[in-house]
Amino acid sequence: MAAERLVVIGGDAAGMSAASQARRLKGPNALEIVAFERGHFTSYSACGIPYWVGGDVEERDDLIARTPEEHRARDIDLRMRTEVTELDVAGRRVKALDRESGTTYWTGFDKLVIATGARPVRPALPGMDAAGVHGVQTLDDGQALLDSLDALRSGDGPRRAVVVGAGYIGVEMAEALLKRGFEVTVLNRGEQPMATLDPDMGRLVHEAMDGLGITTVNGAAVTKILTGPDGRVTDVATDAGTYPADVVVLGIGVEPETALARAAGLPVGPHGGLLTDLAMRVVGHDNIWAGGDCVEVLDLVAGRTRHIALGTHANKHGQVIGSNIGGGYGTFPGVVGTAVSKVCDLEIARTGLREKDARAVGLRYVTATVESTQRAGYYPGARPMTVKMIAELRTGRLLGVQIVGREGSAKRVDVAAVALTAGMTVEQMTALDLGYAPPFSPVWDPVLVAARKTVAAVRGAGS
């Protein structure tokens, strides 16, 4: 009996995790695997790009977990620089374009994995395609940005960088550019940086960025990119003023890359991502799976789908997909929305719902905010740490936690992520047996202090 053919579109985390897991479970005599990747690299950490640009990671190849040659050695027919341009669902085939030769051809499949990732948001504004304007999503993007920075650093002119957007990508790239010796301005259309936090917590990030020498302008919506006679960026115009720029980095965020799937009539959700079941199978299609940044996932706290672009999720999706295709069984139940980041020595973390998220799904809630230190106050190196906790009114069910602080603060959010996943109340959290020693925590961990204060808020609201 001829082997089934699995076709994978996308050669990064979700796609190649799925291909590798399927290969572990089924040999080449039972399952032929063909994977298409339009770029130059596979299985790399896109999350590490800001740290490579900033010089914390010395070599680009340090971000690559597995090369094309390593995948091929495992009997995966990986075709690089080859873009799938059309998907024929009824005919079970994909049309591919070899970017090097320009030739196109069709390849049939028995099973299909769509792992097309996400693309940087690039507003349709004048000058957005000008030389010196960079989105940062792939290793190719990172290399193009580094080439621009190196060219500017080798000259005698000014080194002014403007980052458009103040989310995770924006603040991380601001730090990277600062480390490269650039004068950095962050343009943010929102009330405060880090819109994934509530504004009161975002204000702490803003204050820290100012202290680092990063100029952050809030309430500044970009209207156009101005260019010189050579077509290169010179300024960024906003409704709040114009800011000189020798290089521009777009940190507005990303959106699911689903144009191919949409054209084929596959179902997408309200955030533009593909819709799948718990097995990561595309809804309504038994032989098609999807994972990574191109899908929507269930928010276990809000009960709605969300689009969250994270390598952790993508790799888990790939494992689940590969297991199901290879004859095993796996599911991806959903997420609670945990994320961490940093700008220089300031750590930022969140999980669960913000206040506006809770309001959007009709939840009544209370909040509590505490200021503490990440170590015992008398221990050397103790630094400030702020924890905000959100709980459901009356029931006390934990809804979300946000943390802003110095070294040792961010990973405390994992305790809250576990509590959210388990459906714990804030009162139950106060009894958690967390590790304690002065170098790591005050005798009452800040998360537990926040839980105690939130319990009091719940009881006070009910009286």
Image (tube, rainbow, N blue to C red):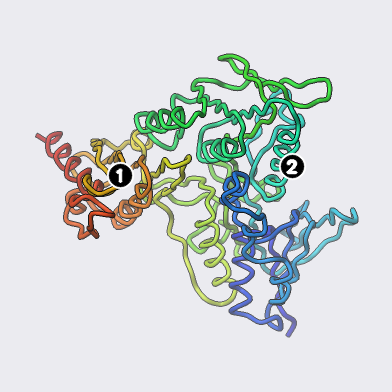
Q: Tell me which amino acid carries mark 1.
A: Leu
Query: Picture quarter containing residue 224?
Result: top right
Q: Tell me which amino acid carries mark 2.
A: Asp
Is the Cβ of the residue at disc 2 closer than 8 Å to that at disc 1?
Answer: no
Q: Position of residue 212 (x, y in %)?
A: 47, 32
Considering the image in quadrants, where does the N terminus appear? bottom right
Residue at 34 percent across and 37 percent down: it is 358
264, 112: nearer the viewer: 112
Choose the circle earlier in sequence order: 2 or 1. 2
Label 1 sits on residue = 399
* SS for callout 2: helix
For residue 207, say whether it is visible.
yes
10 Å crowding of disc 2: few (<14), some (14-19), many (20+): few
Query: Picture quarter containing residue 394?
Result: top left
Q: Position of residue 82 (x, y in %)?
A: 79, 57
Query: Picture quarter containing residue 460?
Result: top left
Label 2 sits on residue = 147
